[in-house]
Amino acid sequence: MSKKVKKRLITILLSVLVLLIATLLITINLRDNIIYFYSPSELQETTINKRNIIRVGGLVKDGSYKYNDKTKIYSFVITDNSNEVNVSFVGIIPNLFAENKGVVVEGLAIDKVNFTALKVLAKHDENYMPPEVIDALKQEGQWQEE
Amino acid sequence: MYFKLPNKIIDELRRWLPILSLTTLIVFLVGLYFSILNSPPDYLQGDSMRIMYIHVPAAWLALGSYSFLALSCVCWFIFRNPNFNLFAKSIAPIGAIFTLIALVTGSIWGKPTWGTWWAWDARLTSMLILFFLYVAYIMTWQSIVNKELAAKISAALGVIGFINIPIIKFSVDWWNTLHQPATISKLSAPSIHISMLTPLLIMTFAYILFLATLFLIRLKIEIIEQKILRANK
């Protein structure tokens, strides 16, 4: 390696390093702006502006999903196993929405535990399984609903 | 690394490209057979999960292509061998198309699964930025007439853009995103059944062959173009 090449190598490695550190600092500090949704626990710690549209995500609590025929309101509870948020929603629920599955709701927080959703998004997890395998796992009692 | 491309590279490429293209086609057909006809649907998503076989390899290789592009740019900065620019220039449009495939198929999958075509979460946004980075790289070459200047600016852009790659990769772990975390990145058992992993791996292999074919075709064009430029000087 000639001197020139060595010098260039050092320069570029240093610039890349500086660039990486700068990005890391920016992304870490922007964390609150980059997150797509708050978990119920994070919602407790945030100051809520009632006019701002925000998103809350977590698991749909088992047995909490209800539909009121008269008012056409869906209601369910989002949990992260330590805190809970009650959600009410009028509109179309996505097909993959289910209890014990992930969900992200977009809308207005009434207070720290009550939420009016304008949009409901089902959050898919990273598991891919054929139906037969799920049935087999369930029979053996090895399938754990998250 | 003061290497030269072999003199007969064009002849060699002419000889091998048809064979490579045919292999790509065959592997693709096998992969599509497994992913569409001979694999089970997902227990939750049903048949719409089959989009994954197109989506995931495209996204992987979009990231891989950019890493290759950035590495070529770094090597160009250090060794000033113009062949590195040929590599970067050849891979850029392919990476852009793969990114676009990942974005479009993801959107088609997102509608029935999430209930929305698009979300401004960290994964989707950073992937869109990757597409723009590819486009910007191509456009600097197109729009700057002075090719020496174009080489410098595009290489700088290629290197700077690389910071987006770890952001895309880890966005699902660092931030709350609508996009699910990686299925096959852990060293432990992947969260996908073997009957679905097999078609995915075949499709990935097909995509790699496809990428190699396109890359060599593009490289051939770039070399010929350079020869014409030199002859006209």
Image (spheres, coloured by chain):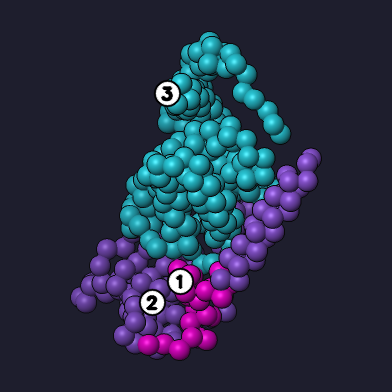
Numbered disc 3: secondary structure: helix
Q: Nearer the viewer, residue B209 or B173?
A: B209
Q: Which residue is mark 3?
A: B232
Q: Is residue B4 visible?
A: yes
Q: CA distance from mark 3 to mark 1?
A: 58 Å
Q: Earlier in the sequence, mark 2 or mark 1?
A: 1
Tell me the residue at 34%/78% (across/down). Answer: A53
Vertical arrangement, residue B222 with respect to residue A20, above or below = above
Chain in purple in the render: A
Q: Nearer the viewer, mark 2 or mark 3?
A: 3
Q: CA distance from mark 2 to mark 1?
A: 7 Å
Chain in cyan in the render: B
* Quadrant where the N terminus of chain B is found in the figure: top right
**How many residues crowd around disc 3 within 10 Å: few (fewer than 14), some, or many (20 or more)?**
few
Vertical arrangement, residue A71 with respect to residue A93, above or below = below
Disc 3 residue type (three-letter) = Asn
Vertical arrangement, residue B13 with respect to residue A142, above or below = above
Tell me the residue at 70%/50% (across/down). Answer: A8
Disc 1 residue type (three-letter) = Phe
The magenta-colored residue range is A27-49
Looking at the picture, how far across and down is residue B213, in whole percent? 50, 24
Looking at the picture, how far across and down is residue B2, in whole percent? 69, 31
* Residue B224 is inside the magenta segment: no
Q: Is residue A95 visible?
A: no
Q: Which residue is mark 2?
A: A54
